[in-house]
Amino acid sequence: MEDELLAEYDFTQMKGGVRGKYVERYRAGTNLVLLDPDIVQAFPNDASVNEALRMLIEMVASLFCIYSAVPARVCYQSRAGTAL
């Protein structure tokens, strides 16, 4: 079977094409972020990034509860997944 793909394509010759036609739909459905190289060394995959961010969220929530006038029951609810 011979390869039918060309080495290059001239997209200016294509009819009906609209640049960026689906870009908004794409952006709405993705949550990708670009990590700096030094961060990538510390977090080799998405699971490690998510784990670190969850720990940070928990630490901030704990500090908020300790140093604020928020009633304890509200802080305990927030730890169970309910927003403060």
Image (cartoon, rainbow, N blue to C red):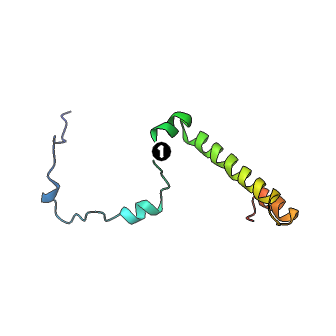
Residue 65 percent coordinates (x, y): 80, 59
Q: Is 31 displayed left or right of 1 in the figure?
A: right
Q: Residue 26, position in %: x, y? A: 41, 60
Question: Residue type at mark 1?
Answer: Leu
Rate crowding at label 1 as few (under 14), some (14 to 19) or many (20 or more) other CA atoms within 10 Å: few
Asked whether 69 or 51 is in front, the reply is 69
Quadrant for the N terminus, please. top left
Q: Which residue is mark 1?
A: 35
Rendered residue at 52%/40% (across/down): 39
Residue 72 against residue 40 in the figure, above or below: below
Would you place residue 37 above or below residue 54 in this image? above
The part of the image, by quadrant, that contains residue 66 is bottom right
**Residue 81, image x and y in percent?**
75, 58
**Label 1's element?**
loop
Residue at image position (20%, 66%) is 16
Q: Is residue 64 left or right of residue 16?
A: right
> In screen coordinates, is 28 left or right of 18?
right
The quarter in which the C terminus is drawn is bottom right
Give the residue drawn at x 48%, y 50%. Answer: 33
Vertically, is 82 above or below 35?
Answer: below
Where's residue 60, x and y in %?
71, 54
Front-lying residue, 18 or 33: 33
Instruction: Residue 27: name its quadrant.
Output: bottom left
Front-lying residue, 42 or 7 = 42
Q: Residue at x 45, y 38 (%)?
A: 37
